[in-house]
Amino acid sequence: MPTGRVKWYDAQKGYGFVTSDEGGDVFLPKNALPEGVTDLKSGQRIEFGVVDSRKGAQAMGVTLLEAPPSVAELRRRPPRSCTASSRI
């Protein structure tokens, strides 16, 4: 099955696009998402099937390969310290 990264996904509109690791963008409708998943984040890795539609390639049967980090997790991470070598 092809894999790729979510290019963008709009939960209100119910669709988005995934950039396939094989190249090219694939339409991503909400009915392709796993049960219980209502949103995807840009950059999130997924695995998906592809069907050809009148308008081009369309994803189906999406599997999440990684979950996006939670807001709480991002807030818990200590800030990266600046060192003299990183400023050069």
Image: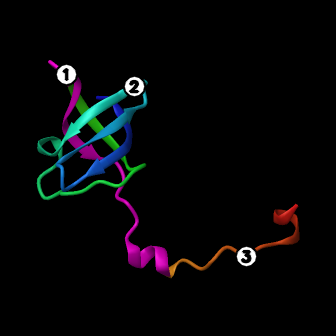
**Residue indicated by mark 2:** 24
Amino acid type, callout 1: Lys
Q: Position of residue 7 (x, y in %)?
A: 38, 42
Q: Secondary structure at mark 3?
A: loop
- Of the numbered discs 3 and 2, the one sitting upstream in the chain is 2
**Residue indicated by mark 3:** 81
Q: Position of residue 46 (x, y in %)?
A: 32, 43
Number of residues whose C-alpha sits closer than 10 Å to that of mark 2, classed few (under 14), some (14–19) or many (20 or more): few
* Number of marks in picture: 3
Q: Which mark is residue 55?
A: 1
**Residue at the location (18% across, 56% down)?**
12
Q: CA distance from mark 3 to mark 1?
A: 48 Å
Which region of the structure is painted magenta?
Answer: 51-75
Q: Quadrant of residue 63?
A: top left
- Of the numbered discs 3 and 1, the one sitting upstream in the chain is 1
- Of the numbered discs 2 and 1, the one sitting upstream in the chain is 2
Q: Position of residue 55 (x, y in %)?
A: 19, 21
- The answer to whether marks 2 and 1 mark residues whose Cβ atoms lie closer than 8 Å is no
Amino acid type, callout 3: Ser
Amino acid type, callout 2: Gly
**Residue at the location (47% across, 73% down)?**
74
